Amino acid sequence: MTPATLFGLCAAALIGVGLYGLIVNPHPLRKIVSFNVIGSGVFLMFGTIARRAAAAGLGGDPVPQALLITGIVVAFSATALAVALVLRLFETTGSLSLAADADDP
Amino acid sequence: MITPVDIGIAILLLGLAVWTAFARAAFAAVAGFIAYGLLLALVWVRLNAHDVALTEAAIGGGLTGALLISAAARMRRIEQATNTERTGLPVRLLAIAASAGVALALSVCVLVLPDPAPSLAHPTVLNQEATGVGNPVTAVLLAFRAIDTLLEAIVLLIALIGVWSLAPERAWGGRPGPRQVADPNGKLAWLARVLAPIGLVAGFYVFWVGADFPGGKFQGATIIASMWLLAQMAGLAEVPPIGRTWLRVGLVAGPLIFIAIGLAGTVTAGAFLAYPVPFAKPLIIAIEMALLPTLVLVLGLLLAGTPAQELSK
């Protein structure tokens, strides 16, 4: 087994753990954290594919690596928007509940 | 070959991911996530993706972590009240089954990946000389897949518009985030005075070497933006009100210059975002120079958050 395969399997497990956290934790901020864990697992899996495609004297395929940089930045901007939404929900309702029948203000 | 270090990193990484899912408090989960981001940067180094490692450490771990931890701190006091809301056992069991199923399916996919793997490394290296850039990842980001980078800069702007649009009516045009109260003679102010100049030099260095070595505008902009945030937290600088004209101009200048250079390519090189070969390197540097201030502003303002302070008269 190569390091790429090891981290590929690790990425699969990370996606699983993130998915569990996303479903089970009711706190919206923790859902965002878990969603980021899923995202990083997807990135890592893509990264192992880049590593396996090493050729031409490079340590990895530069095209997926460049896409990963783009992906990480886009994930950050989505997280910033999600956090702003949660903070606004908290300021407006004073609650962190996402339940449909949350206490009416 | 797999070294014991690889196995250790993989186990720690998984352990931290489990921690973010099971920790009792949101604040603790976020703290675990920051450590997870930094550890993930080490994995990227092990996978020979040094540019990605820098981005992960700066943005994935650093900026995302700062964003989440400040939000967690603001919500901490009412968390106890919501802790009563728990997910039932059937949902938990279903979640375990779903996540185990997804993880298993993906593991099988990893094990049956084609060998030899398809690769674009050869075409990149063959054509890289025409761009005049020494770092193949930078060549992909700014020449071969420049459209991705352009759209990414625009996505950041759209996210910022989304964050701003959550402002209550009275705060529109005002300063983002809660007012920072800091002792101008305190330890944090001292740290900001000492660290910010070093950080600025480091940020510009990472930006500049990106052409030939791991680094680039995103990583450099993140370092510079974090120095700006440090100065804000120490009370040495204030976030500008979002209505300022210079701020709006700075936010759109980078993408607009990028688009202008791309449009010029339709005339001089026959395609949108194509560069005439002798001028490829200067044009790439011009785009990076134009994007850097915009990225610093966008990243800093995304962290500062929604305008919440009323416009002072």
Image (spheres, coloured by chain):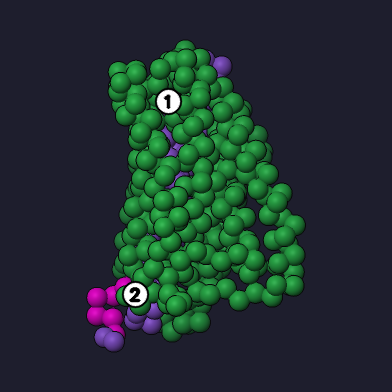
Q: Which numbered disc covers residue B263?
A: none
- Residue at 34% x, 68% y is B166
Query: In the image, B106: left or right of B138?
Result: left
Lateral position of residue B258 relative to residue B211, left or right: left
Q: Is residue A99 magenta?
A: yes
Image position of B182 with respect to A80: above or below: below
Mark 2 Cα within 10 Å, few/some/many (few <14, many 20+)?
A: some
Figure check: B190 above or below A46: below
Q: Which residue is mark 1?
A: B143
Residue labelled with disc 2: B168
Apparent side of residue B226 relative to residue B299 in the rendered image (left or right) = right
Compared to residue B165, the image places residue B85 above or below, namely below
Chain the render paints green:
B
Q: Residue at x 57, y 73 (%)?
A: B180
Please rate how many residues cluster around mark 1, counting C-alpha atoms within 10 Å: few if below 14, some from 14 to 19, many from 20. Answer: many
**Residue B184: horizontal and vertical position, in percent?**
70, 72
Identify the secondary structure beneath mark 2: loop
Residue B10: x and y in percent read 57, 44
- Quarter of the image that includes the C terminus of chain A: bottom left
Asked if both marks, 1 and 2, belong to the same chain, the answer given is yes
Give, as a three-letter code, the residue at label 1. Answer: Ala
Q: Position of residue B245 (x, y in %)?
A: 41, 57
Looking at the image, residue A36 sits to the left or right of residue B8; the answer is: left
Residue A54 visible from this viewpoint: no
Front residue of B9 and B40 = B40
Find the magenta span and give its range.
A97-103
Q: For the residue labelled by badge 1, is the local secondary structure a helix, a strand or a loop? A: helix
